[in-house]
Amino acid sequence: MSEGRQQDDRSAEAAAFARAPAPGEVVVAEVGFGRYAQVVYDGKHRLTADEPIESGGLDTGPSPYRLLLAALGACTSITVRMYAERKKWPLRQVAVRLRHSKSHAKDSAAADEKPAKIDHIEREIELTGDLSDEQRQRLLEIANKCPVHQTLERANEVVTTLRPAP
């Protein structure tokens, strides 16, 4: 079978697989072009994810780690905005800049262990508006309570199952 035909088949399968996500469910499936391009379905919303060209992708969308940063940034901004509105504080705009990197854990140097890596996320929040120093500090505290931030800092469990073949 030609590669074009395989891509068409994968694209049709992705559309069929993602057609009816259950409420509260996100479905991710291969798009059918490029090695890593994915389509993300969340109800009526459709996003694309991919790897950058230097990693073998076509760069048709953000990488998974960029989507993770976007989730943290969006949650941070929304949480800060909601709190400022509730307090009727003069917050005009929130901007969040994020960066992700990995570093080797310093305490994982056992001779028989592969060195562990630690994920490091830098988040810089810019608050525009006529806010007092106390209000700015409180909004920083609130930013650290956004649900995605809390999820990332907790121990997490991902349970994976394999669906039966169609």
Image: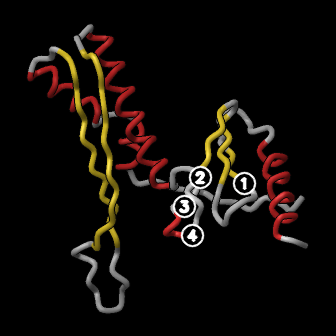
- The image position of residue 163, as x and y in percent, is 79, 58
Determine whether label 1 and label 3 are within 8 Å by CB. no
Sort mark 2 into few (<14), some (14-19) or many (20+) by Cα contacts within 10 Å. some
Residue under circle 3? 51
- Please tell me whether mark 2 or mark 1 is closer to you in this view: 2
| Residue under the image location 69 percent in, 32 percent down | 43
- Nearer to us in this view, 154 or 125: 125
- The image position of residue 102, as x and y in percent, is 33, 66
Determine whether the residue tagged by mark 2 lies in a helix, strand or loop: loop
Determine whether label 4 and label 3 are within 8 Å by CB. yes
Amino acid type, mark 2: Thr
Toward the bottom, the furthest residue is 111
Amino acid type, mark 3: Glu
Residue under circle 2? 60
Q: Relative to residue 77, is residue 87 depicted above or below?
A: above
- The image position of residue 164, as x and y in percent, is 84, 61
Amino acid type, mark 1: Val
Q: Is residue 126 left or right of residue 133?
A: right
- As measured in the structure, the alpha-carbon distance from the residue carrying label 4 to the one carrying label 2 is 12 Å
- Nearer to us in this view, 57 or 164: 57
- Nearer to us in this view, 35 or 114: 35
- As measured in the structure, the alpha-carbon distance from the residue carrying label 2 to the one carrying label 1 is 10 Å
Determine whether the residue tagged by mark 4 lies in a helix, strand or loop: loop
| Residue under the image location 80 percent in, 40 percent down | 19
- As measured in the structure, the alpha-carbon distance from the residue carrying label 4 to the one carrying label 3 is 7 Å
Tell me the quarter of the picture where residue 32 sits: bottom right
| Residue under the image location 49 percent in, 69 percent down | 54
Amino acid type, mark 4: Gly
Q: Which mark is residue 56?
A: 4
For marks 1 and 3, the one nearer the N-term is: 1
